[in-house]
Image (cartoon, rainbow, N blue to C red):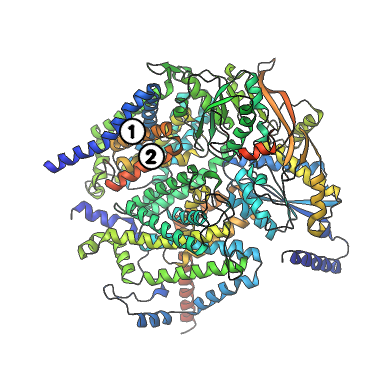
Amino acid sequence: MRSRAFQLWAWLIVIGGPIAVFVVWALVDNARQFVSTFLNGVTLAALYFLVASGFTLVFGLMRNVNLAHGSLYLLGAYVGWEVGDATDMWLLAVAAGFLTAALVGFLLQVFVFRFMQGQDLRQTMVTIGLSIVLADLMLWQWGGVIYQFDPPRAIYGSLPMPIIRGYPTYRIVVFLGAVAIGLLLWWFLNRTRVGMMIRAGVDDRAMLAASGVNVQRVFALTFAIGAGMAGFAGVVGGTALSISPGEDTRYLLASLVVVIVGGMGSITGAAVGALLIGLAEQFGLAYAPTYGIVFTFVVMALVLAFRPRGILGKPA
Amino acid sequence: MSAAQWRRAMNSGAGRYALRTATPAAAAPLPAVEAPRVGPAISAALGKIRLRHVIVLAAVIVYPLVVSPFFTFQIGGQSLALGLIALSLTFLGGYGGMVSLAQMSVAGLAGYMVAILGTSIDPISLHWPWWLAVAFAILIATGFATFVGWLSVRTEGIYTIMITLAIGVAFYYLTLQNYSLFAGHRGFNQVNAPDVLGVNLRDPLPFYYLSLACALGGYFFVQYIIRAPFGIALQGVRDNPRRMRALGFHVTAHRVAAYSVAGVLASVGGVLMIWYNNQISPESTGLGRMIDILVIAVLGGMRHPIGAFAGAIVFVLVQNFAIDLIARERFNLVIGCVFLAIVLFSPDGLLGLWAQLRARLAAFGAQAKFRSGG
Amino acid sequence: MRLKTPVLRTLMGTAALVALCAGTAQAEDTIKIGVLATLEGPFAAGGQDSMRGADLALKLHNGMAGGKKIEFIKGSSDASPDKAVNATRKLVEQDKVDIMIGPLSGDEGIAVKNYSKTQPNITFINGSSGAQATTLVDPSPNFFRFHTEGAQWMVGLGEHALSKGYKKVFLVAEDYGFPYSQVQGFMAGYCKAGGHVVKKAWVPLGTKDYSSVISTIPGDVDALVVVLGGADAVNFLTQYEQVGGDKPMVGGTITVDQTVLNFKGKRRESLLGTPSAGPMADSIDTPEWKKFVSDYKANFKDGFPSPSLFAFLYYLSTEATLEGLDAVKGDLSGGQKAYREALQKLVLHGPAGDIKIDENRNGIGDTYITEVVKKPDGEFYNQVVKVTHNVTETLGLSKEEFTKMGLGSREVPSCP
C-alpha cells in the first residue's frame, strides 16, 4: 500500500541521488572518459550476462551451485581456440566452444550429478574438485602461455563515434550478441514447451516429476545449455580479452557476484546483476583505480545486507 | 507450510550430508533443554576415554622428541596450525551445515593484525607488545567472522559457499591493493614470534608444543560445545531450521554465533600460521589457500573434529614429499583427484574410510568368532 | 645446533660405508645443491626454462666443480613466498643441501633471504628474483645475487626516450613490486634529465581489460611507457588501437618480446622503433652470447627458440656457484667462509657481459637498450642500440640521491 511505494521511492532517492550527482560531475569534468567508461561497463556487462546466465539456469532448476562453471568457460575457450587455429574460421571456434562445454556438462549431469540428487552440498564439493582437476589438466595441456583469437577483420576494428574518437567494434558486437541471446533465452523459457517445463521445475521440482515429465532429461538438457553458455562465453570473452590460466576463477567469481546481486535462478536477474556489476567495475577502475576491483564486492555486500536473495531473487 | 517448502526441507542436502549418528566416542547426547551440570559432565567425559585416545595423546606429545626438527616444525607444527583452521570449517560445516570458504580469510586477517599491531620490518607496524597484538588480532578477526556470518546466513544453506567464496576473494583483493594498512603485494616480512621466558616461540620444539596446546584446546572446546545446549541447538538448526524457529529458537542468531565461535578457532590458527611463516602476503589468503582448507576438512571427514587434523597431516605430507614421488608440477592434479574421489565415494573422508574399515574388521572378527564356535 | 648433526652423521655414515665395502664412498665427494624454481601454476613455463638454464651450466662443467661431483636436488614453488620458504626449508633441513640456488620471483626472494639468516652455514644464491628490497633492505650475509635486478634493467632507457623526443609520457604498469622497480629504473634517469611522467596508471595484477585505463590517457603526451608482460601488452595494444590511439610506446624488459612482435604473423608497423631495455637481448652480437644460445638449443630440443630471461639468469647464478666452488677447490668447511670470500671476489664472464657483486652482494652488470627493427625478410626483432656497463643498484645516481629517493613504489619516483 502506501508503505511499499514509499519504500521504493526512498530507495530510489537514496541510491539514485548520489549517482545522478556523480553522473553530472563526470560529464562536466571529462565527457570523453565518462562516455567511454559507460560503454565499457555496458559491454562488459554483456559478457558477464553470457557467463552468468548459464550459471543461474543450472542453479535455478537443479539447485546445483556449479563451481566448475569457470573451468567450463576456459575449456570452451581453449578448445575453440584449437578449432579456430586449425580451420581459421572464428565462427566455427565459437560453435566448437559451445558444443564442447555443453557436451561436458551433459556428461557430468548424466554420469555424476544424477546420482546425487538432493545432496546440494555434495554436488558443490564435486564441482570444486572438478574445477581443480580441470584447471590443472588444462594447464598441463596448454601451458601458462596466453592465447589470442583471430576473429574476422570486419568485427575487430574500430567504430567511429561521437564524443569519443572511436570504439572497438567487437565490444559492440558482443553487446548486440548478448542482447540477442538474452531474447533467445527468454523466448526459449517462456514460449516453448521445454522452457515451460524448466520454469515449472524451478518452482517445484517434485511436482514436475509427479506430472509425468522425464525430469532427468530436462536436467541434462538444462545443464548442457548452461555449460554450453559458459563455453560460448569463453570464446567470445577470450577473443576480447585473451585466454590464460587465471581466467576460470575470474569468470566464476564474476558469475557468482552477478548472480548473488541479481538473484538466483532468474535470467532477468542475471541481466540486471550483470549490468550493475559491469558498470560498477568499469567506473570503479576508471575513477578509483586502486580499489576498483573491491568496489564490485562492496556492491555485492550491500545487496546481501539489504536484500539477501538478490534484487530479483525468488523466495523459493 | 506449502508443499514446495516441505519438499525443499526434505530435499535440502545439509541435513543429509552431515552425519547425524554420533560417533562411538560421543556416546549418548545430553538432553537438549537441560543445562549440563559441570561435575557430572566431567565425569561423564572422563568415562568415555578409550585406549586409543591415550595412545594418540601420548604419541603427539612424544613425537618431537623422536623426529628431526624439520619434521617437528614443518610437518608437525604446520599440520596442527592448518588443522585448527580446518577445524573451524568442520565445526561450521559438519555441525552447523554451513560450509564457509572464508575461514582462511579470517585466519589471514588475524595474521595481518598481528603483523600490523605487532612487530615486523615494515614501517606500518605499531610495535605493540605481542600479547596485546595477539589479543586484538583475535578480537578483530572474530568480529570480521561475525560480519561474514551475518552477511551469509540469512539465505539458504547452499548460498553460504558462494557468498563466503566471494567475500574471501574480496578480502584477497583488498589486501593486494591496499598499501596504507595491508602493505599490498609485498606483505609483511619478519613478523617474528615473541620470546617468552627466554624461549623463542618459533624454535621447532616450543612452536610445536604451542600449536599442540592450541589444537588440543580447540579440539576439546569443539567437543564440549557440540554437547552444550548451544551446539545441540545448532545441530537442530542445521537439520530443520523451520522446526527450530517454531520452537522459539532464533535461527539466524544461532548461525551467526556459530560463525563467531568458528572465527575464534580460525584466528588462533591464523596467529600460529603467521608465526610459522614469519611473514604474510595476499597469497596466504588467496583462492588457492581457501580451497586448501576445504580440501583438508573434506579429506579428513566432517563428521568428527579429529578429521580436520587427520586431513591436515595427510595434506602437509603430500605437499612436502610429492616432489620426491611424482612430478611436483602435477601436485594440484593429485590433490584434486583425491578430493574428487573422496567426495564421490567416501563423503566422510578418511574418518569414513576408517569407520568402514573398523566395521568390516568387527564384522570379520564376529564372523570368525561365530565360526570358531562362540 | 645444526652444524653438529650433519657432520656427525656424514662421518658415521662414511665410517660404516668404509667398514662395509671399501671403495665406493661416493657420499663424501658429492656436493648437494638445491635448485628452487616456480614449477607450479601459470609461471611453470618460466620455471621449467630456469631449470634448463641451471642444468646447462652444470652440463658445461661436466657435472663437477671444485673436484667434486655435483648433485642437484630440485624444489618447486608456486610464486608465493610461504611455499617458497617451505620448499627451501625442506631442501636445507631435510635433504641437507650445502648450497641453495633460487628462487624465481621477487617476493619469494625476500622471504628466502629472511630464511637464509636462520641458516648461517648454508650459502644462498639467488635464482632470478629481481626485487630491490632483497639486497637493499636488511641484506643477509649469506644471500648472493649474481645478476642485476629489475630497476637496474631499465637504466639508460630514460635518457634514450628523451633523445627520441618523448618529453611527456603516460605510464601503464601492473600494481606490484617488479613493475615498481622497473619504473624506478626508468624514471631515475628520465626525471633527472628533464622528462615528465604526466600520469601513472597502476592496473591491478591480472587485469586484461585496459579499456578504462585507455580512456584516461591524456591527449598531449608524446609516448606511452608500457611495463606489462608480453601477452598483456598485446591485449593493451589491440585495445588501444581499436579506440583510435596512435602514440608510440616505450617498453619494459618483458614487454616487447617475440610474442608481441610477431604475433600470428601480423606485424604491427606501429611497433617499429619501440625502445626497451634489459640484462640481455636475443640479438647480442658477441661470440659468448652466440655460444650460449647454440648450447641451449643443442641441449634442449623441447625448449624455447631462444633462451628466456629465466634460463639466462639461472644459468648465471649456477655458473657463479660452480666457479666459486672451483676457486676454493670444493672446500665448504668452516661455515663456508672461504667459499663466500671467493664468491665476493668472483668476476663472472657471462654470455651478456661481466658480472661482479657489490657490498650488499647484489650484481653489477650490463644493461642493453634495444629498439624494434625490421629484418630484410620482414620479421621484427629487437636490435641492440646501446650497452650501459657497470650498472649498480643506485641506478646511475649518487648514493645520497638514491637513498633520498628510496625504493620504487606507486609514488616514488615522481615527476609529473
Query: Cα distance, mark 2 to mark 1?
Result: 12 Å
B258 or B55, which is in the foreground?
A: B258
Q: Residue furthest bottom?
A: B374
- Does residue B52 appear to the left or right of A206 in the view shown? right
Pair 2/1: label in front? 2
Q: Residue furthest left?
A: A1
Taking B5 as reference, is C49 above or below it? above
Circle 1 — which element?
helix
Q: Which mark is residue A275?
A: 1
Give neighbour class at mark 1: few <14, some 14-19, many 20+ (Cα, 10 Å).
Answer: many
State left or right for residue B348 relative to residue B229.
right
Please tell me whether mark 2 sits on a helix, a strand or a loop: helix
Question: Subunit of mark 1?
Answer: A
Q: Which residue is mark 2?
A: A296
Q: Tell me the amino acid under the disc marked 1.
A: Leu
Q: Which mark is residue B168?
A: none
Share a chain, discs 2 and 1?
yes
The amino acid type, in three-letter code, at marker 2 is Thr
Name the residue rendered at 79%, 46% in the picture: C344
